[in-house]
Amino acid sequence: MRMSRMFLHTLKEVPQEAEIPSHILMIRSGMLMKVASGIYDYLPLAWRAIRKAEQIVREEMDAAGGQELLMPAITPAELWVESGRWEVMGENMFRLKDRHKRDFGLGMTHEEIITDIVRRSVRSYRELPLILYQIQTKFRDEPRPRGGINRAREFIMKDMYSFHISWEDLDVTYKAMYRAYSNVFLRAGLDFKVVEADSGTMGGDECHEFMLPSESGEDTMFLCGKCGYSANSEMARFHYQKPDDLPPHGDPIVEIDTPGVSTIDDLVKFLKRKPSDFIKCLIYRVDGELVAALVRGDRDLNETKLRKALGAKEVELATPREIEKATGGPLGFSGPVGLKGIKIIADYEIQELRNAAVGANKADTHIINVSFGRDFEVDELAELRQAVEGDCCPRCHEKMTAERGIELGHIFKLGTKYSDSMKATYLDEKGEDHPIIMGCYGIGVTRIISAAIEKGHDKDGIIWPMSLAPYHVVVMPVVSSNEDQASGAEKLYRDLLERGIETVLDDRDLRPGVKFKDADLLGFPIRAMVGERAIEQGGVEIKIRGGEKPEMVPADKAADYIVDYIKKELDRLNGLRTAQEKEEEYVRVG
Ligand SMILES: [Zn+2]
């Protein structure tokens, strides 16, 4: 590619909304153009990188036994209604109607569609296991899209689904996916960490996330330096130690008027006390029954923990009407004092509370001076809150560290959630019907690119891993108008093209400084320069992006040098993959 002909529109000014390095650099290098909030054009350089990421993903999924297909992006509501997710997806789903006023949703994930394929085609255990995947544009109406393609509303994802006759069989594929995912990220040059979700009960929901540690990440990982426990913020457990002595109970409870004050923030202002002096009382519908769950005012309740503590299948916040029926008061004024006829479960910390403020189960009323054990009891104590920085490891009780990260991929044992609700079954050897056991596995393909840039950049621009670089080499005459330099560069350019190397010739008649700046910004792994000094010495100056000083290589050896370097780099990345494969089969980290 000649740079003079290249679609290249670098920018000096970056829009204010671009805050993280990958977003800034993709805009500055002219790889992305914003069409609407969270929706981008992938311009030619970006698209080359994305297709490379896609190809790595495809190769690894195929190697692990996957078969690629393509499902529609426009998906009929009926399938989502069947699984119960037409409601659940809420405003995250883009919805539309066809000319017959039938409802459709733009695909944000494809469990329903693929389960429909399988229930309509698979009959016998002989046809299982089956692993199907697609690489496709996904849609998610994010409330706050940001970070460029790191959290966009339209993005490319690889989603894979596996179908099995038993949990043991699912386990085999799950392990293969764990390896395949590691391979993908190693080849993309990303030093990932794997965090585990709570392994949960038999029957399901084991799940691992592949994370890139990064300040720009929106997720938090909790890591134990001592025993290796690692989990994402949604799943992280911790060790709770009840204090030996608690302060005595204080004054008796008092009801106070709190007109219109229904949130913790409002209460903090109104009563001039700390958020930790309050008890949040949340009413949930748990497998059809209402339950009150208590956490301290400054804590976030973790619904997964609540579900597990209650041994429930599903937990969902109750509606205002249900809350009114169960507590007698409106939403925002629930509290445990005098609450009857409903199960109360509390986070361990609630036992420590003295002089707390709670809702009075009456409109515009709260109760203060509330003490656990004196003014209310609970049916059950459990770990319900999210982990926070400084919590101790659930296994070895050492202090955990919290680190930010970007989620790269996710593997998940679904079990029979979809096969049950959508009746996807197979016949066993005896001709008996069983629900198919499923796994699902996702990778954000466009996010691999933003993650690679988060990891590989400096103040001048992008530092691509060889495996994702849109082009491997830029060849440039330092002064394009100099005939010797121009013809020297042209010769090397042609040599490299002939040898199948993805090469750009910077033939633009621009000042050398501008060309160097662009080369650094775009992040070509190799820059080959033919300047005055090179011509004098019969050589080519070769500089590795992110490396030390340029090296002078004899002109007739330059192409070999470059070809070798690229091969060596790609082999190194692939070598990480092989080394990892030879290592332990499957590392349980959680
Ligand atoms: Zn530990």
Image (tube, grey):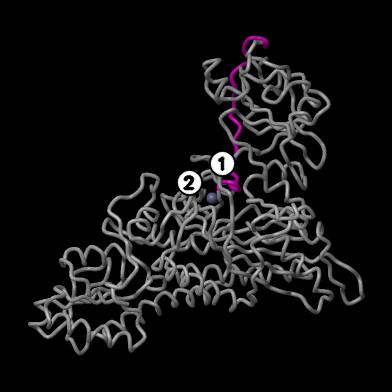
Residue located beneath label 2 in the image? 402
Decide if residue 195 is on the left or right side of residue 553.
right
Q: Secondary structure at mark 1?
A: loop
Q: State the image coordinates of residue 422 (x, y, percent, origin top left).
A: 81, 60
- The magenta segment is 233-255
Between 469 and 97, the one lying in front of the other is: 97
Marks 2 and 1 sit apart, C-alpha to C-alpha, by 9 Å
Q: Identify the residue at the far front of this view.
A: 99
Decide if residue 24 is on the left or right side of residue 222.
left
**Local crowd size for mark 1, using a 10 Å CA cut-off: few (<14), some (14–19), many (≥20):** many
> Tag 2: residue type?
Ala
> Tag 1: residue type?
Ala
Q: Main secondary structure of the magenta part?
A: loop
**238 magenta-colored:** yes
Vertical position of residue 317 compared to residue 184: above or below: above
**155 magenta-colored:** no
Q: Residue 479: name its quadrant.
A: bottom left
Residue located beneath label 1 in the image? 387
- The residue drawn where x is 45% and y is 63% is 42
Q: Quadrant of the N terminus?
A: bottom left
Q: State the image coordinates of residue 49 (x, y, percent, origin top left).
A: 42, 69
Q: Residue 427: name its quadrant.
A: bottom right
Between 355 and 526, the one lying in front of the other is: 526
Q: Secondary structure at mark 2?
A: strand
Cβ–Cβ under 8 Å for marks 2 and 1 = yes
